[in-house]
Amino acid sequence: MDRDTLHETATELRLATFRLARRLRSVRPLDSRNSAMSDAQLAVLAALRTHGRHSLTALADRERVTAPTMSALVSSLEEQGYVTRIPDEQDRRRVHVEITPDGVGLVVATFERRTELLEAEIVELGLSDDELRTLHEASMLMRKLAEQ
């Protein structure tokens, strides 16, 4: 691939990803305890649901935030009953963070609502079977890129 094509592809991918992410974030978590749950808080819950219990440091590294920022996020989520802190059995200075059943429910419900939004928009586009397969393949490549 030549440099111009690579640059154009990266630009289009950036623009499309940004716009799509903005639309998906507009579907807010259904949270009766706190209507202002942030995207960062939801991301922490999603990481815990997907990857299981983490130390605060490991969770901060995974989410690419500072330890104090993660501590504040976890404290807020703990107050709402979405996570719990569990002392490390070998080192009492260290704590692990684990998602609660209420946290799992919030993540599942929010992600399902966001998936339904995408499904409706894909249907509205009227994509052919070939286009739908291409979109699926592109989504797998985007996931690889995001997990790098």
Image (spheres, rainbow, N blue to C red):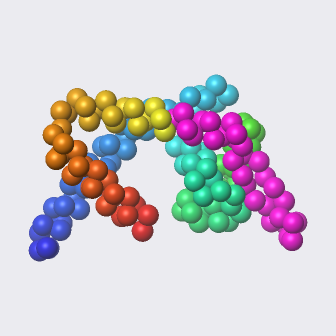
Above or below residue 77? Residue 117 is: above
Query: Measuring 62% from the left and 61% from the top, which residue is drawn there?
Result: 60
Q: Which residue lies furthest to the top in this view?
A: 32
Q: Which residue lies furthest to the bottom in this view?
A: 2
Membership of 43 in magenta stretch? no
Above or below residue 44? Residue 120 is: above
- In the image, 78: left or right of 26? right
* Count of numbered circles on the image: 0
Can residue 69 be seen in the rendering of this structure?
A: no
Residue 118 pos. (x, y %): 34, 36
| Quadrant of image for the N terminus | bottom left
Q: Quadrant of residue 144?
A: bottom left
In front of the other: 18 or 53: 53
Query: Measuring 11% from the left and 69% from the top, which residue is drawn there?
Result: 4
Residue 106 pos. (x, y %): 60, 36
Residue 38 pos. (x, y %): 55, 40
User: What are the residue bounds of the magenta stretch?
Assistant: 82-110
Can residue 133 be seen in the rendering of this structure?
A: yes
- In the image, 136: left or right of 27? left
Query: Measuring 56% from the left and 28% from the top, which residue is drawn there?
Result: 30
| Quadrant of image for the C terminus | bottom left
Query: Measuring 69% from the left and 58% from the top, which residue is drawn there?
Result: 53
